[in-house]
Image (tube, rainbow, N blue to C red):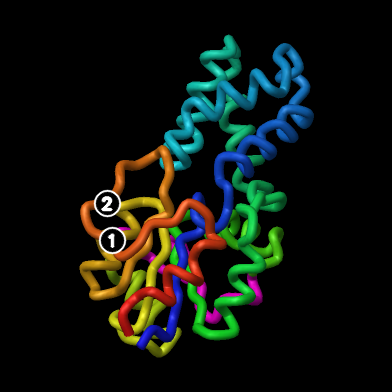
């Protein structure tokens, strides 16, 4: 019997690309030297080096500054310091996230397993008002392990007091999310996206989070 639903955060519940774009557009106005380029040009230059959020952020800023012709080597470091301090405070959830989590919370225990910095990921969760839906939140920086390490999945399951066969994992990354969940014996549902090819094995595919309740209901119990 399914008792718990575990989620990835970025590109599953939170629109990471749009969250980052908005942050960069606002960041542009805080650094006078960036006025040599429009906020859109600065944002685009940074986003092209983000590798869907997996790139080293300092390296991405350094590459963007080089592309834009800045020679001050400290600029990337200052941008990165500002990123670490403020990023995540204005996160953008995908449509239907709050409504779906509220519905699922009435029937299941809800957990979150996310890679990333604790400060930034916590800010995203808090800023879009979804913190209260989760009975367990495991963030890699705080935990000491990151997906696809199964230890971080196990920790969340233990906090929810369920075994893998009683849980469903929802994520966008076939390697970091779907494979380890299936390895542990969980059900796994892939959030279809253009960044990754479809996983070889999963228990369902959604394109919008609002599709999730009906998919879960169709899983064997």
Quickly name the residue at label 2: 199
* Quadrant the C terminus occupies: bottom left
Residue at 65 percent across and 76 percent down: it is 132
| Residue 213 horizontal side relative to residue 164, left or right | right
Disc 1, SS: loop
In the image, the segment drawn in magenta is 131-148
Which disc, if any, is residue 202? 1
Rendered location of residue 95, percent (x, y):
64, 54
Rendered location of residue 141, percent (x, y):
45, 61
Above-or-below relation of 129 to 65: below
- Please state which of residues 211 and 23 is positioned toward the viewer in this rendering: 211
Mark 1 in CB contact with mark 2 (< 8 angstroms): yes
Residue at 68 percent across and 22 percent down: it is 40
111 falls in the magenta region: no
146 falls in the magenta region: yes
Residue at 59 percent across and 23 percent down: it is 44
Quadrant in which residue 146 is drawn? bottom left
Q: Residues within 10 Å of mark 2 (few under 14, many from 20)?
A: some
Rendered location of residue 197, percent (x, y):
30, 42
Residue at 56 percent across and 40 percent down: it is 17
Q: Residues within 10 Å of mark 1 (few under 14, many from 20)?
A: some
Quadrant in which residue 65 is drawn? top right
Which disc, if any, is residue 73? none
- Please state which of residues 78 and 173 is positioned toward the viewer in this rendering: 173
User: In this view of the protein, can residue 146 be seen by the observer?
Assistant: no
Quadrant in which residue 205 is drawn? bottom left
Disc 2, SS: loop
Above-or-below relation of 214 to 166: above
* Quadrant the N terminus occupies: bottom left
Rendered location of residue 104, percent (x, y):
55, 77
| Residue 193 horizontal side relative to residue 15, left or right | left
Q: CA distance from mark 1 to mark 2?
A: 7 Å
């Amino acid at each position: 019997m399914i008792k718990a639903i575990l989620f990835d955060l970025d590109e599953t519940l939170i629109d990471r690309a749009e969250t980052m774009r908005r942050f960069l557009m606002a960041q542009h106005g805080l650094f006078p030297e960036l006025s040599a380029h429009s906020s859109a040009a600065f944002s685009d230059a940074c986003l092209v080096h983000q590798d869907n959020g997996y790139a080293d952020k300092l390296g991405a800023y350094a590459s963007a500054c080089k592309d834009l012709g800045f020679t001050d080597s400290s600029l990337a470091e200052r941008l990165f310091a500002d990123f670490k301090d403020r990023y995540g405070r204005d996160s953008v959830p995908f449509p239907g996230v709050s409504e779906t989590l509220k519905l699922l919370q009435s029937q299941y225990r809800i957990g979150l397993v996310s890679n990333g910095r604790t400060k930034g990921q916590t800010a995203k969760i808090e800023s879009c008002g979804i913190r209260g839906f989760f009975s367990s939140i495991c963030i890699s920086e705080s935990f000491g392990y990151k997906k696809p390490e199964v230890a971080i999945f196990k920790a969340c399951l233990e906090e929810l007091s369920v075994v893998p066969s009683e849980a469903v994992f929802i994520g966008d990354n076939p390697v970091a999310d779907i494979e380890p969940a299936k390895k542990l014996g969980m059900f796994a549902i892939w959030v279809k996206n253009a960044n990754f090819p479809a996983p070889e094995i999963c228990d369902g595919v959604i394109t919008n989070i609002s599709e999730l309740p009906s998919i879960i209901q169709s899983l064997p119990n």
